[in-house]
Image (spheres, grey):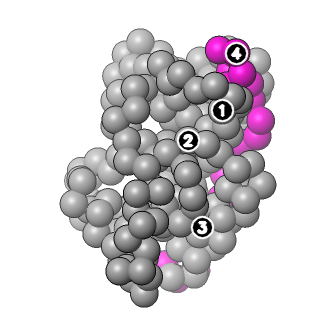
């Protein structure tokens, strides 16, 4: 478990090009408190570029409002559909770019099976099981499964030892990559897949 000397705000992100779930929790004296959650819904008939821009702008606002200390995002998984995997990778890259541009934020990436196991006790849990456990843990009704997944990602990430990279280190290289932040974030995300 993380040992921080202050209140810790954690954002979890469940990336998707159509629906990006997000959830924000605060950990205070080992109590997990729900702050807010939601889903960024993009226009289904919009171009990928417009969808990605909308996701980036929305996440930037959420991060600005809640100022998380830790950000946790689901690792990319291999999909049967190459197009689906590519679109997920693009949404994930945009989310990582929004996070990396922040100062002093710890970014963690967790596999879906790890998150499921951390929340429900089994890596094969379905969305209903995740939603049920999140509602029990937080005492809050969560209607949208993407938001419940994001809250699960936040909780699992807080409870995971710091095997992460710190964006402060990446910001030291900002001059080198300043014109290509998004391309570098997407490349890094795909390299880790």
Vertical side of 154 occupied by 61: above or below? below
Closest to the camera, between mark 4 and mark 3, is 4
Q: Find residue 144 and report its horizontal and vertical position in percent.
A: 66, 41
Q: Which residues are magenta?
A: 27-48
Question: What residue sits right under mark 1 in the picture?
Answer: 8
Residue to which mark 3 is pinned = 55
Q: Are marks 2 and 1 in contact (CB under 8 Å)?
A: yes
Q: How far, Cα to Cα, is label 4 from label 2? A: 16 Å
Task: Name which residue lies at 55% across and 51% down.
Answer: 104
In this view, the mark in front (2 or 3): 2
Answer whether residue 90 is magenta in the image.
no
Left or right: 44 in relation to 110: right
From the viewer's side, name the closer residue of 148 and 171. 171
Q: Secondary structure at mark 2?
A: strand
- Spatial CA distance of label 2 from label 3 is 19 Å
Between discs 4 and 2, the one toward the N terminus: 4
Label 2 CA crowd tier, 10 Å (few <14, some 14–19, many 20+): many
Q: Residue at x 70, y 15 (%)?
A: 29
User: Is residue 11 depicted above or below 3 in this figure?
Assistant: below
The first of marks 4 and 3 along the sequence is: 4
Out of 126 and 137, give the one closest to the viewer. 137
Q: Which residue is mark 2?
A: 70
Cα distance in 3D space between marks 3 and 1? 24 Å
Question: Which residue is disc 4 drawn over?
Answer: 29
């Amino acid at each position: 478990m993380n040992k921080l000397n202050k209140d810790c705000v954690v954002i979890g992100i469940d990336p998707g090009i159509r629906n990006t779930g997000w959830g924000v929790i605060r950990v205070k004296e080992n109590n997990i408190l729900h702050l807010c959650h939601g889903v960024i819904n993009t226009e289904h008939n919009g171009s990928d570029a417009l969808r990605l821009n909308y996701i980036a702008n929305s996440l930037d606002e959420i991060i600005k409002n809640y100022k998380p200390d830790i950000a946790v995002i689901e690792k990319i998984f291999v999909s049967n559909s190459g197009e689906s995997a590519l679109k997920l990778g693009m949404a994930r890259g945009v989310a990582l770019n929004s996070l990396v541009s922040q100062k002093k934020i710890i970014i963690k990436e967790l596999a879906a099976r790890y998150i499921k196991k951390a929340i429900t006790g089994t890596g094969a849990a379905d969305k209903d099981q995740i939603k049920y456990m999140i509602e029990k843990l937080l005492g809050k009704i969560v209607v949208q499964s993407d938001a419940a997944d994001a809250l699960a990602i936040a909780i699992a990430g807080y409870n995971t030892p710091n095997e992460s990279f710190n964006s402060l280190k990446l910001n030291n290289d900002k001059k080198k990559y300043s014109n290509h932040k998004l391309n570098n974030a997407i490349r890094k995300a795909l390299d880790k897949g």
